[in-house]
Image (cartoon, rainbow, N blue to C red):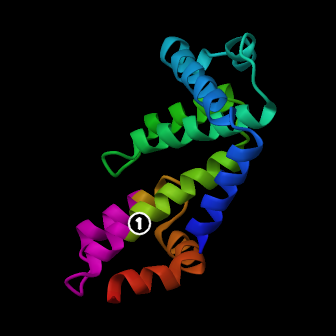
Amino acid sequence: MTKLADWLRKAVVTLVDPEREERVKRVSNALFRAIHQHGSKMVLSETLKNLECTETDIEIAKDRVLQRILEKIWEDGTVNDKEKRTVEKLAVALEIPAGVLKERTLEFAKSHFAASLADAIDDGVIDSTEELRLSQIAGTVSLSLPEFVRTFFRSEAEQFVRTVFM
């Protein structure tokens, strides 16, 4: 059902504002270039000053850039302190609220946690190495393993059980 709703939303936006996707791509590309050139010292207003775009375009582009940054740092399945600080600095430069960064980071952590937990319980026993891996994932969002497990299962329990047992 969610895919259908997303498709309908995109179709309506394309009908009402057919140029939006192109503007968002231009803004995203400008943000990536600025990050590549200046890192966390990038100035958002300077980067966007010559671009014709709406506030909505900017917000969508910032979200896409953050998404890509998070994908990149999670490629190896872990996030170290240096990567965490870098993302926090880039989020400040992109003027992304701390709450949004926390929410997006939690989404990535939950995704990796689900995969690691499924692997860990595959043999019926969670050994110390697997527990350490799960703790590291929880630590990326500054939670202990028990806190993260509670957070994870509050929102993801049904989907996790379906994935594991079906």
133 sits left or right of 15 in the view:
left
Considering depth in this image, is 14 or 86 the residue closer to the camera?
A: 14
Q: Give the image location of residue 108, x and y in percent.
A: 49, 55
* Residue bearing mark 1: 113
Q: Does the magenta stretch include residue 48?
A: no
As drawn, the residue found furthest toward the right would be: 55
Q: Name which residue lies at 53% across and 76% down.
A: 156
As drawn, the residue found furthest toward the left would be: 123
- What are the residue bounds of the magenta stretch? 115-136
Image mark count: 1
Considering depth in this image, is 144 or 40 the residue closer to the camera?
A: 40
Q: Name which residue lies at 66% across and 61% down.
A: 8
Task: Tell me the quarter of the picture where residue 28 sits.
Answer: top right
- Magenta-drawn stretch, dominant element (helix, strand or loop): helix
Q: Name which residue lies at 44% across and 34% down.
A: 82
Q: Name which residue lies at 51% across and 31% down.
A: 86
Q: Give the image location of residue 2, x and y in percent.
A: 60, 70
As drawn, the residue found furthest toward the front would be: 15
Near mark 1 (Cα within 10 A), the count class, few <14, some 14-19 or many ≥20, is many
Can residue 74 be seen in this snapshot? yes
Considering depth in this image, is 61 or 132 the residue closer to the camera?
A: 61
* SS type, badge 1: helix
Can residue 142 be seen in this snapshot? no
Q: Give the image location of residue 29, x and y in percent.
A: 54, 23
Q: Give the image location of residue 35, x and y in percent.
A: 54, 20
Name above or below for residue 84 compared with residue 99. Answer: above
Q: Is residue 124 magenta?
A: yes
Query: What residue type is disc 1 on?
Result: Phe
Which quarter of the rendered picture does the N terminus lie within? bottom right
133 sits left or right of 14 in the view:
left
